[in-house]
Image (tube, helix red, strand yellow):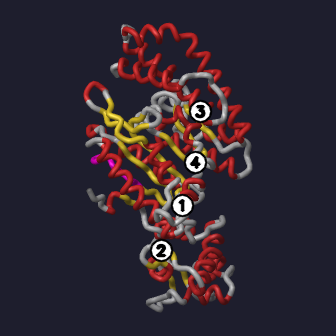
Amino acid sequence: MSISPTRISGPKASTNIDQDWSVAMKDPRRKIPLELSESLKKKDPDAYNALSQLTPDQLKSLKAADKDKSGTLSLNEVKGFLLKNGQLQGGGKFDNFAEALNVLFSKAAGKKVDVRTPNADVLYLQFNNNKSNKSNQTAEKNGLKNVVANDPDKPQFTGLDVTSEFNKGPTEAQTAFRAGMQQYLDGLVKNGGTMTGLVISGHSNGTEMGSEGAHHMYSWNLDIRAELKRFKDMESPPGSGTFPYKAIFEKTEKVGLLACFQGGAVEQWRDIFPNATIGGTTGYSPDAGSRASPAIYGACQAASQYHQDGGDFLKAEKVGRSVPGSRSDGLQGERGLQISVPSSPAERLKVAQASFDSAKTEYAKVSKEIDDAVKNGSTDKKRMRVLYEIAKKYENAAAGLTAAGGSPGVDPVKAQAVSARLCRLRGL
């Protein structure tokens, strides 16, 4: 089967120039005067003050883009000069032009501005099959766009939605995902781009993405962690000795796991994204229409930035937990928001051990009740959901401790079987 290139969508690089122009010029229709004159000083002192920061050579470089020779420079003229096929041109006159704009915009905006995009990207992976929930999906996407727009890296926001093929079955899901992801990663390699952020949204048991059927039963159609690891470790072309995608995964800074149960396995994602701030929930993640859903990625973004600026883990986590929406819909309550920042192996093991000890204690208190529920399933559905969350948290904490180099002393197959059995019995 073929995947249409339109499945991957994102704004053009010119969006960054639009944003910078709007901030500096206050009005996208406003033009830049290109002559320092007494009349300009009287008519528009702000423009005169900003323009006076430019050297004669910089002012000359701006005049080179005045295509209609009007003595002013419009946004369209700037993009027409600086962009080709949606990409910023560099070298010689283009670098001089960009630097002149940087000086002008920084003065006009009152803060440092760089019109040259860092070619960063945030990928939004969607595996959502709830057709009656379109408004919630739109709300989540718009919320994420707003979060990404506040990222200092000025990344583009790209969506890869393989929902249609995903819901047909495992073979179709894998084929669609691999084709779309390959296209996306090859585009980054070609343009020297980076996937600074990744967001995954859809039903999941922490490892596999699921398609929901009748009575809340799931078909686990794609092992998302295995698929992403496959790309990270992929040799391309085969036999070439080059692994073009590995650096992309290692440079990823933020990973938001919005899928149900997904976040409870944050430590198991560390091998794929060793340098990322990873966030999710230990229990059921918030509904897509909730402010809390995009807030999971927002928490990662804020914590990551604080950590990159030299802040320690505890303060970075606190910063992440304070973003808009992070206290709504029980995100920091029963849903159990988790934020994991890159740390040393020793610190990672310490955190994983503490999480496991806490989960083990909680599990021990209800272990007999869980055993009874697994045997006969007689516990009421509301209680079954609570038991499932406790069992899943225990399973993920054990796996997380193992991933961090610890020894939980738990049979992972048995732990997974218990939570899987409860999941089937909960009837939610």
Q: Please tell me the numbered disc located at residue 273.
A: 4
Marker disc for residue 378? none
Q: Secondary structure at mark 1?
A: loop
Label number found at residue 87: 2
371 is within the stretch colored magenta: no
Q: Is residue 285 above or below residue 232?
A: above
> In this rendering, would 259 be left or right of 105?
left
4 vs 2, front mark: 4
Range shown magenta: 159-165
Pick the front one: 75 or 36: 75
- Among the two numbered marks 1 and 3 on one chain, the one whose residue lies closer to the N terminus: 1
Mark 3 surroundings: few (<14), some (14-19) or many (≥20) residues within 10 A: many
Marks 4/3 in contact by CB < 8 Å: the verdict is no
Q: Amino acid at mark 4?
A: Phe
- Residue at 37%, 59% in the rendered image: 8
Q: Residue 136 in the image: state x and y as whole percent.
A: 35, 40
Q: Earlier in the sequence, mark 4 or mark 2?
A: 2
Could you tell me if residue 289 is visible in this image? no
Q: Camera-side residue: 101 or 193?
A: 193
Whether label 4 touches label 1, CB < 8 Å? no
| Type of the residue with mark 3 | Gly
Disc 1 to disc 3, C-alpha distance: 27 Å
Return the residue at label 1. Answer: 243
What separation in Å lies between label 2 and label 1 (alpha carbons)? Answer: 25 Å
